[in-house]
């Protein structure tokens, strides 16, 4: 089992920045993938960014150049630095973990990000 706890969401004005954090605990073992998904009201959950235990990253096109994902393996923590936020980024952001050899995914409880215009 893997437990994920997110923090860092909140309310910000358009053009502002936020940094999300996700701490993983439990059966953490490399290789793995961690990352962030988001879900806006009435819309399906969508990929934002992922990072592997080896450091490879993947971003959705709509966040490239604005968001940066990073990790601290020693702290089992992944971060999402979000810059130049716009109202379309308003959503609940969920942390995600998956062992690379497994199809079983773990999810955090979500953190709300609201961007006002």
Image (tube, rainbow, N blue to C red):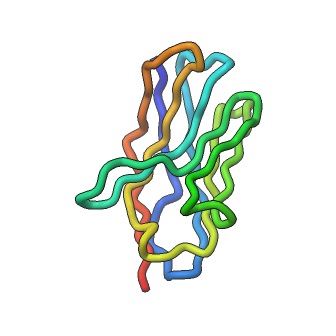
Residue 85's spot in the image, x, y percent?
55, 73
In this orientation, which residue lies closer to the viewer: 110 or 43? Answer: 43
> Is 49 above or below relative to 19?
above
Residue 16's spot in the image, x, y percent?
58, 77
Q: How many marks?
A: 0
**Along the horizontal axis of the image, is 70 left or right of 37?**
right
> Is 95 above or below relative to 84?
above
Residue 3's spot in the image, x, y percent?
46, 28
Report the residue that reaches farthest toward the front.
Answer: 61
Q: The N terminus appears in which quarter of the rendering?
A: top left
In this orientation, which residue lies closer to the viewer: 112 or 32? Answer: 32
Q: Residue at x 61, y 75 (%)?
A: 84
Q: Residue at x 56, y 53 (%)?
A: 60
Report the residue that reaches farthest toward the bottom.
Answer: 117
**Picture quadrant where residue 30 is located:** top right
**Picture quadrant where residue 23 is located:** top right
> Is 68 above or below relative to 66?
above
Q: Residue at x 42, y 71 (%)?
A: 88
**Along the horizontal axis of the image, is 117 left or right of 69?**
left
Residue 101's spot in the image, x, y percent?
57, 13
Q: The C terminus appears in which quarter of the rendering?
A: bottom left
Q: Residue at x 53, y 57 (%)?
A: 8
Report the residue that reaches farthest toward the left.
Answer: 42
In this orientation, which residue lies closer to the viewer: 26 or 86? Answer: 86
């Amino acid at each position: 089992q893997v437990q994920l706890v997110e923090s860092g969401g909140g309310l910000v004005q358009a053009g502002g920045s936020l940094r999300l954090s996700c701490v993983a605990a439990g059966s953490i073992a490399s290789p793995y993938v961690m990352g962030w998904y988001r879900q806006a009201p009435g819309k399906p959950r969508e990929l934002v960014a992922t990072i592997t235990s080896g450091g490879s990253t993947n971003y959705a096109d709509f966040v490239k150049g604005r968001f940066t994902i990073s990790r601290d393996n020693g702290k089992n923590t992944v971060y999402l630095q979000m810059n130049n936020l716009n109202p379309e980024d308003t959503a609940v952001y969920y942390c995600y973990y998956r062992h690379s050899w497994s199809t079983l995914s773990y999810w955090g409880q979500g953190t709300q990000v609201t961007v006002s215009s």
